[in-house]
Image (spheres, grey):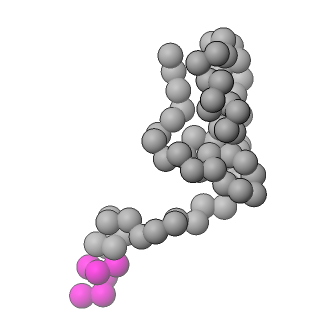
Amino acid sequence: MKSPCILVCSIDDKTGYCFGCGRTRDEVGKWSLYTDSERDIIMDALPARLDIIERKPRRETRRSRMARERDQA
């Protein structure tokens, strides 16, 4: 079964969409119950949803910390 999940499971309070995949909590919970056609319809909507999420990192990632430290050196 195809899934847009990228294991970044956190819901944006403003939009109700997952920061990682763009699905709602209900869509994530019912994903295995949807037909292939229903999943395709949702997946087609995800890029537009992800575009409206204001992405603010909750914490500094190792990669960004290393880049910051390299730039400061």
Residue 60, quarter of the rendered image: bottom left
Query: Residue at the right extreme?
Result: 14
Instruction: Give the total number of marks visible in the rendering.
Output: 0
Residue 46 position, x and y percent, is 66, 37
Query: Residue at the bottom extreme?
Result: 73
Residue 43 appears in view: no
In the depicted structure, whether residue 10 falls above or below residue 61: above
Q: In the figure, is residue 17 to the left or right of 7?
A: right
In the depicted structure, whether residue 61 falls above or below residue 36: below
Residue 62 position, x and y percent, is 32, 66
In terms of secondary structure, what is the magenta stretch mainly?
helix
Name which residue lies at 52% across and 66% down. 58
Name which residue lies at 34% across and 78% down. 68
Tell me if residue 10 is in the magenta stretch. Answer: no
Tell me if residue 72 is in the magenta stretch. Answer: yes
Name which residue lies at 47% across and 40% down. 6
Residue 17 appears in view: yes
In the depicted structure, whether residue 40 falls above or below residue 56: above
Name which residue lies at 59% across and 18% down. 32
Q: In this orientation, which residue lies closer to the viewer: 70 or 58?
A: 58
Residue 17 position, x and y percent, is 68, 46
Residue 42, quarter of the rendered image: top right
Q: Which residues are magenta?
A: 68-73
